[in-house]
């Protein structure tokens, strides 16, 4: 199985990154996608991705860090997208998106998100979309870019929202959220759209699973998310693993 959203490049893993990946492989992981967050970290991200078979990366400016970004960072992003056009490991744009729970001006986030969508269209790349309290604005913007596909990372929301993302050509990233009792609405939304539109992800080191709150999350825990999905869909973990890997390949390795 593939962890479609894992920040293994973050400092939290500096002390034991190779060991974490060996442990994850022992649990059945074959690959992961490292999302971009800040221009200053792109070269570090690329070097981690190049070191390991099965690792892929995306380039983008995460909404959380936009107060520290400048227009030069957007130019750097565009230039690097240009320069990496023949790099088979650079498979997406992101993560980008809208987070209306943080102290970054919505107007700035909307502008930068739209710039990412324009780049996705231009370079014909899928986008990794971060959301929080922003489904309506994201869906509204995606309508303006009908050719752009991607994934709604760490999806949580209603069946209505899930179905609209799928109609817009997007997959839903399924992470630790579904391991919590209270996530009924999200679990029902996943059932409503069906397995062929879902990807597995940990968002490590963030988004700890139920029972592991306060601890560093890790790609080693991906099989536990797959197991919850297997129970939800009344299928074997193997078939969840196969289907979500197919989905990953269809979206990102096209
Ligand atoms: Zn992330």
Image: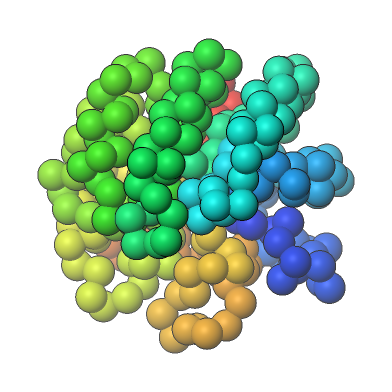
Nearest to the observer: residue 146 or residue 235: 146
Quadrant into which the C terminus falls: top right
Residue 35 location, x and y as percent? 61, 46
Which residue is depicted at the point 17% across and 53% down?
158
Which residue is depicted at the point 81% across and 42% down?
43
Residue 250 location, x and y as percent? 49, 27
**Is 196 on the left or on the right of 127, as rendered?**
left
Indicate the colouring scheme: rainbow
- Whether residue 240 appears in this view of the structure is no
213 above or below 81? below
Which residue is depicted at the point 54% across and 68% down?
206
Which residue is depicted at the point 45% across and 75% down?
209
Nearest to the observer: residue 65 or residue 223: 65
96 above or below 169? below
Quarter of the image for residue 85 reads top right
- Whether residue 248 appears in this view of the structure is yes
Q: How many marks are shown on the rendered structure?
A: 0
Residue 11 location, x and y as percent? 75, 66
188 above or below 147? below
Quarter of the image for residue 147 reads top left
**Is 62 on the left or on the right of 169, as rendered?**
right
Quarter of the image for residue 168 reads top left
Residue 228 location, x and y as percent? 37, 66
214 above or below 252? below
Which residue of the protein is positioned furthest toward the left in this rendering?
Answer: 160
């Amino acid at each position: 199985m593939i962890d479609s959203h894992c920040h293994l490049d973050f400092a939290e893993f500096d002390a034991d990154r190779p060991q974490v990946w060996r442990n994850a492989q022992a649990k059945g992981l074959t690959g992961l996608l490292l999302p971009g967050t800040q221009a200053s970290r792109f070269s570090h991200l690329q070097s981690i991705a190049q070191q390991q078979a099965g690792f892929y990366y995306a380039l983008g400016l995460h909404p959380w860090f936009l107060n520290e970004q400048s227009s030069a960072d957007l130019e750097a992003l565009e230039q690097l997208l240009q320069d990496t056009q023949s790099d088979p490991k650079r498979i997406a744009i992101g993560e980008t998106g809208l987070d209306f729970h943080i102290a970054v001006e919505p107007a700035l986030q909307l502008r930068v998100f739209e710039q990412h969508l324009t780049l996705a269209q231009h370079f014909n790349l899928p986008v990794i979309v971060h959301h929080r309290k922003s489904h309506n604005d994201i869906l509204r913007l995606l309508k303006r870019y009908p050719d752009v596909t991607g994934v709604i990372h760490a999806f949580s929301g209603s069946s209505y929202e899930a179905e609209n993302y799928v109609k817009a050509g997007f997959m839903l990233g399924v992470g630790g959220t579904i391991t919590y009792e209270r996530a009924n609405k999200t679990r029902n939304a996943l059932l409503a759209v069906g397995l062929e539109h879902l990807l597995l992800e940990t968002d490590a080191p963030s988004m700890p699973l139920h029972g592991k709150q306060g601890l560093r999350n890790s790609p080693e825990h991906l099989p536990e998310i797959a197991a919850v999905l297997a129970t939800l869909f009344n299928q074997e973990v193997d078939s969840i693993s196969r289907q979500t890997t197919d989905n990953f390949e269809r979206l990102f390795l096209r």
